[in-house]
Amino acid sequence: MKIFELFRRNNVLTIDVMGDKTTAARVQVANLAELEGYDETNQAVTDATLLELHERLGHLANDTVERMADSAGSDIRLTDRSRPNCLTCAQGKQSKKNQSNDIKGPMTPKDRRGNQYLINFVDYLTNYARVFVAKNKVEAAKNFEHFLLYFEKNFNCHIQVLRTDGGKEYVKVDPFCNSAGVRRQVSEAKN
């Protein structure tokens, strides 16, 4: 089954889509007059550094870029094979800092008791997680107090740090954290 035809008209290489003879379907590829005297053996060789090619090829691994450049017929000459650290690659490999808790919501529909927020607390040492439902964000501080008491009682260990985002819902928990000996770590909101 043919999808397109390729032919030469008036010294222009043209592709016609089969079954569609409109001008929009016709694609002119190259003016053949410009290609006269073109010799495949005299192709220009591209000179580039390893870092330049790494960036041009979407931050491909340096080993892969070197193999591509060294392969026969690539017409690429590496002028510098040094491997400096790529800032974009380093930033892409970073992960966000874990939050000890997070608030999700408002969710619709509300549950039968009118709760529309989920507040989760995670202990990253034991991977213990607890989820509370709440009617509003203000209940987050109260739920942390419940979580702290429950966790310390059942696991016989002390929570040392409460890591939260910069949201306003945990402003009221500061006095409780001070009295309980829990440090607060606050990151930027939505980090």
Image (tube, rainbow, N blue to C red):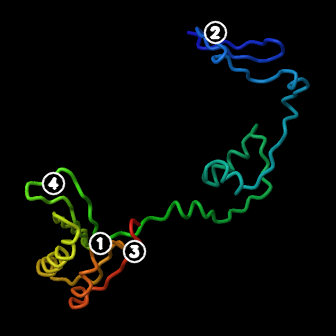
Question: Which image quarter: residue 163?
Answer: bottom left
Near mark 4 (Cα within 10 A), the count class, few <14, some 14-19 or many ≥20, is few
Cα–Cα gap, marks 3 and 1 = 11 Å
The quadrant of the picture occupied by the N terminus is top right
| Residue beneath the point at 11% across and 77% down | 154
Q: Earlier in the sequence, mark 4 or mark 2?
A: 2
Q: Are marks 1 and 2 in contact (CB under 8 Å)?
A: no
Residue 136 sits above or below residue 170 on the image: above
Describe the element under mark 3 as helix, strand or loop. Answer: loop
Q: Residue 102, position in %: x, y?
A: 28, 67
Cα–Cα gap, marks 4 and 1 = 25 Å
| Residue beneath the point at 26% across and 60% down | 104
Describe the element under mark 2 as helix, strand or loop. Answer: loop
Q: Earlier in the sequence, mark 3 or mark 1?
A: 1
* Viewer-nearest of discs 4 and 2: 4
Q: Earlier in the sequence, mark 3 or mark 2?
A: 2
Cα–Cα gap, marks 4 and 2 = 58 Å
| Residue beneath the point at 62% across and 14% down | 17
Residue 100 image label:
1
Q: Residue 21, position in %: x, y?
A: 63, 9
Q: Earlier in the sequence, mark 4 or mark 1?
A: 1
Inspect the image, locate mark 3, and give the three-letter code of the amino acid beneath it. Ser
Inspect the image, locate mark 4, and give the three-letter code of the amino acid beneath it. Lys
Q: Are marks 3 and 2 in contact (CB under 8 Å)?
A: no
Describe the element under mark 4 as helix, strand or loop. Answer: loop
Q: Which residue is mark 4?
A: 110
Question: Which image quarter: residue 27?
Answer: top right
Q: Which residue is mark 3?
A: 187
* Viewer-nearest of discs 3 and 1: 3
Inspect the image, locate mark 2, and give the three-letter code of the amino acid beneath it. Lys
Q: Which residue is mark 2?
A: 21
Inspect the image, locate mark 1, and give the three-letter code of the amino acid beneath it. Ser
